[in-house]
Image: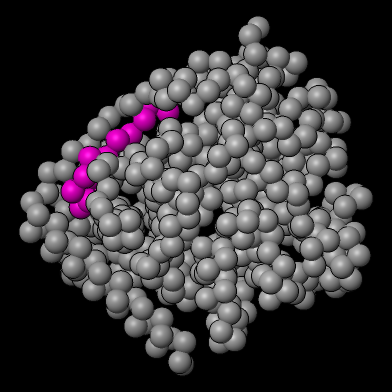
């Protein structure tokens, strides 16, 4: 059997493993859901042990599906939900608390206090991020302040902090490697974009001891080797790591400045490669590290929407309008349009470019004739319209419009959504044959890290499934966007009114 790369994609709702051949063909794949934990309204947690269990299970199942043996694994790549925060014992590897998920809003008050103290410009300038509960730094602070005995153990170096990649790496290497890569580090509110190191001033501002921090490494290169696993032999190099959205940008082969992609997963994330220097945003976007590989660092602008595929899950699980997520397309297609219904996907707050953590979703324009199909159509439209707002903000930051948008993630399989996305963007939308570009990005980085291939070969092997062309008249496009933006303003007004009550 020829060598293969195993990619581990640890996401918000499931852990996926993918076996990738030397020609980037997908030989096998498996996915297992992880439970979502909601201790209070607005709080979201994961059990790190469930994450670890599904990692091993998915890896075994993917290799079985591919008919391969772990001994032929040339390299291991990891991609992960980025800002989700875990703290575990350095000696035992046991978590000290559930992982606090990126969607969790429990640190909104802390973020407000930091803003009132005048610290947001410092964080914005050093990290490229905004003070929002989304990011890891305030989650770490919450854990240190609220888990009994944790701060003392942290200051003594007896515990480790990490994003999910770091936790998995620790387990994969039998506790030998407490590391992360530059992309995940850049999402912590603790990492300086220009020095590519954790920043002492930021650590002090958030009262986080440096003793708990992982070592930061490039995204492609050997992080450690496997040890003591029941699904892989010892000695396999873990040689590619990137946060999920950066991995998708790499997996879409957006290697040149000006190339962009949007991943439609639980949330939706639009990234634009800006080249070798960080570009500050004046329109509510984030500046982040895209990757470091082969001695070069690339940066990106990012717009984050917290709810995309999760809106379809809401239709299924809470509203009962569909039995399975893919059913939403047929239901939405049963009407010609949303019938005037407008949906603002703010079920977990508004991300870029608005950054309103207390906002809640809105469903407007309901009439006596409105039905389940109109609501389903409005939900899909709302996802596409929030992406359009991000794309226009991005174009304003770089001073030129996007030329096309590459798409991936589960919801990008929805032709109705992708066509509407092209219509309201006024741009071609390009969908690859393999929608798992997040896992493919992890595999690509891992192969690059052990010199199985180079970027030129990766570009040659990328395959396109379909190109969607815009068909909406410009005046209708502008009217549609105007109505949606007014609905977003109403959501903001309601969130302020609720906060004052």
Occupied quadrant, residue 394: bottom left
Q: Is residue 358 left or right of residue 19?
A: left
| Residue 11 in view (yes/no) | no
Answer whether residue 427 is magenta in the image: yes
260 displayed left or right of 474: right
Spot occupied by residue 16 in the image (x, y as percentages of width and height): 59, 36
Say which of 373 and 241 sits in front. 241
Give residue 67's position: percent from left, percent from top.
63, 13
Q: Residue at x 41, y 81 (%)?
A: 495
**Region rendered in magenta:** 421-434
The quarter of the displayed image where residue 404 is located = top left
- Image coordinates of residue 48 in percent, x first then y, are 73, 51
Residue drawn at x 70%, y 14% is 72
Q: Residue at x 36, y 78 (%)?
A: 492
Q: Quadrant of residue 193?
A: bottom right
Q: Vertically, is 233 above or below 415? A: above
Q: Residue at x 43, y 62 (%)?
A: 280
133 relative to 298, above or below: below
Residue 177: x and y in percent read 81, 42
Say if residue 240 shows up in the picture: yes
Name the side, left or right, on which 394 lies relative to 454: left
Report the residue that reaches farthest toward the top: 1
């Amino acid at each position: 059997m020829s060598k293969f790369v195993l990619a581990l994609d640890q996401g918000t709702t499931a852990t996926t493993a993918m076996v990738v051949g030397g020609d980037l063909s997908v030989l096998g794949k498996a996915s297992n859901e992880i439970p979502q934990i909601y201790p209070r309204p607005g709080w979201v947690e994961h059990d790190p042990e469930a994450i670890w269990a599904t990692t091993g299970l998915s890896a075994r199942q993917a290799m079985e599906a591919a008919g391969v043996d772990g001994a032929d694994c040339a390299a291991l790549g990891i991609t992960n939900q980025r800002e989700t925060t875990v703290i575990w014992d350095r000696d035992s590897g046991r978590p000290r608390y559930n992982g606090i998920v990126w969607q969790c809003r429990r640190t909104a008050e802390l973020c407000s206090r930091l803003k009132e103290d005048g610290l947001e410009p410092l964080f914005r300038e050093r990290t490229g991020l905004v003070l929002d509960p989304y990011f890891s730094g305030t989650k770490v602070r919450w854990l240190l302040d609220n888990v009994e005995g944790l701060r003392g153990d942290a200051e003594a170096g007896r515990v480790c902090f990490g994003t999910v990649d770091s936790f998995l790496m620790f387990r994969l290497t039998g506790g030998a490697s407490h590391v992360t890569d530059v992309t995940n580090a850049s999402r912590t509110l603790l990492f300086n974009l220009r020095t590519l190191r954790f920043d002492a001033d930021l650590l002090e501002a958030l009262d986080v001891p440096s003793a708990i921090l992982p070592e930061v490494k490039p995204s492609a290169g050997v992080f450690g080797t496997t040890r003591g696993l029941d699904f892989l032999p010892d000695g396999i190099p873990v040689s590619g790591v990137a946060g999920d959205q950066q991995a998708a940008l790499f997996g879409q082969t957006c290697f040149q400045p000006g190339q962009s992609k949007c991943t439609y997963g639980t949330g939706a994330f639009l990234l634009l490669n800006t080249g070798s220097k960080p570009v500050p945003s004046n329109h509510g976007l984030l500046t982040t590290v895209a990757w470091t590989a082969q001695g070069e660092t690339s940066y990106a602008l990012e717009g984050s929407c917290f709810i995309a595929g999760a809106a379809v899950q809401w239709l299924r699980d809470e509203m009962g309008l569909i039995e399975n997520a893919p059913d939403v397309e047929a239901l939405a297609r049963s009407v010609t349009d949303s019938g005037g219904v407008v949906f603002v996907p703010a079920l977990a707050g508004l991300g870029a470019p608005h950054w309103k953590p207390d906002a809640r979703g809105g469903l407007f324009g309901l009439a006596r004739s409105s039905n389940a199909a109109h609501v389903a159509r409005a939900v899909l439209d709302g996802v596409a319209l929030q992406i359009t707002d991000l794309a226009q903000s991005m174009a304003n930051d770089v001073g030129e419009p996007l030329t096309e948008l590459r798409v991936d993630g589960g919801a990008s399989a929805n032709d109705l959504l992708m066509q509407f996305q092209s219509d309201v963007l006024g741009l071609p939308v390009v969908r690859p044959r393999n929608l798992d570009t997040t896992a493919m990005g992890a595999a690509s980085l891992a192969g690059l890290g052990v010199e199985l291939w180079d970027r030129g070969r990766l570009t040659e092997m990328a395959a396109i499934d379909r190109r969607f062309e815009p068909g909406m008249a410009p005046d209708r496009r502008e009217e549609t966007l105007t109505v949606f933006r007014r609905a977003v303003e109403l959501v903001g007004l309601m969130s302020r009114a609720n906060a004052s009550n």
